[in-house]
Amino acid sequence: MTAYAYYPGCTLHGTAVEYGLSTEAVCRALGIELHELDDWNCCGASSAHAVNPWLAHGLVARNMRLARATGLTELAIPCAACFARFKETQHALGDPKTAAGIEEIAGGAVPRDLTVVPLIAILGAPSVREKIRAAVVRPLAALKVAPYYGCLLTRPPEVVRFDDPEDPQTLDEILRALGAEAVSWPGKTACCGSSLALSCTEVVLDLSHRILAWAEEAGADAVATACPMCHSNLDMRQGQMRRAGKGDHHTPVYYFTELVGVALGIGAAELGLSRHLVDAATVLERVPARARG
Amino acid sequence: MPAAVESRDALSFVEATSGQKFAECYQCAKCAAGCPLGRAVDLSPQQIIRALQLGQADLALDSRGLWMCVGCQTCVTRCPCEVDLPRVMDALRAYALATRRPAALREVAVFHRVFLETVKRLGRVYEVGLIGGFNTLSGRLFDSVDLAWPMLVRRKIKPLPARVRARREVAGIFARAEARRAKEAAR
């Protein structure tokens, strides 16, 4: 049994509820214990750092102190944007002058011995991936999936130190362990427009449409992601893309944890598959269901 | 304040806050080539850093490109000189707001304000309040309304907000961070 302190972030309790449900279900099935931080606060992504870097560090620092209070040394973060903010603050703590400023804003000492891990790195570690492969009861053999990493899991590389920033492989390998085909496509690390969704919607529709079009041209039946911002732009805004004349997409976008859960035989309701705006059930009908065990 | 003095203040604030030296950029334009917003902005990342090199902070501060940058980190990842442009952008916006300069893309500034007001009050994001507040203040009343019902029935948004118990602690972080930014921008 491996245990992690767990920071879900705001979206996993809200717009990315299916990411939260599937994360917890999959970790339970794999014997990974998640201890949610007590009374955690928003990390500030994507607004705090954009207008006041001190605020961004202060908000993260409080959560780092809560993580340390669990007694665990590793902090698991599913959301790519939250993960990147924690890594930025850890990076900033490396400079003594900045660190003093951060502790002043945070109102106390900030732990330096915490390891911040994106959930995808935990499930993608070779030993866990092999465990997943062995536990698959419903191979996704009929599915072609576009592995979509987005921006913040791998960039900037000196700060986040995860996978390759131009051609990452972790998600590809997880998908292959599930029996799915990870298609080769140009959109792996493209930007969806992120937090411009409300303020510059047109730009987000353009960028997100382009990503879906690339995935479809590569023959993908679905897109897999680890980022709630990417998911909400790609899944929820397909209707707006259609009405704006950008493109007629009907491509389901899954959190990678949902696909792991499906392959492990976990039920659709437990994974939150009905929470998508684009139908997420039909594509999965191609994958024959088998009883667990 | 004369423009030249203000520009000098902005440049030193941005260099100190971002920890970046503008002179290290040799204008290869890799940042502009990879910028996902290249087609949508007035000044590219390369042009923004050029303006700073030339001491013309006003050009950068008043650009739409500054407010449209979402910090996707593509530019810094590819920069051969390792100039961290997203940090420069963060510092420029911080300076613009601390000195009450109108944003070239008002909607983006409104979004950040409403978002952070929510977090300051509740400790967490509250989507209904965020969309409602943004639509009211930006005057775009019916934006995203098509998504409200589908999100509600899927329980992706909740009518009532989640709240942190230690809200005073969170408010303290906001107060100290805001005071520090204001002090540094006034220096």
Image: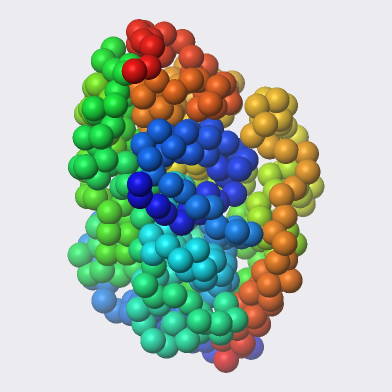
Q: Is residue A28 visible?
A: yes
- Residue B108, compared with residue A226, is above or below; it is below
Residue positioned 50% across, 52% down in the render: A35
Q: How many marks?
A: 0
Spot occupied by residue B67 in the image (x, y as percentages of width and height) = 54, 58
Query: What residue sits 55% from the left and 43% below the top?
Result: A12
Q: Residue B48: x, y in percent?
A: 41, 66
Identify the residue shown where x is 46% and y is 66%.
A71
Is residue B172 left or right of A182 when viewed as pictured?
A: right
Give whichever of A67, A241 is nearer the camera.
Answer: A67
Q: Is residue B118 left or right of residue B177?
A: right
Q: Residue B99: percent from the left, percent from the top? A: 64, 78
Q: Quadrant of residue A190?
A: top left
- Nearer to the camera, A115 or A210: A115
The answer to which of A63 and B30 lies nearer the viewer is: A63
> Is residue B144 depicted above or below A139 in this figure?
below
Q: Is residue A292 above or below residue B166?
A: above
At x 59%, y 49%, the residue is A10
Instruction: Look at the image and tell me in which quarter the C terminus of chain A lies.
Output: top left
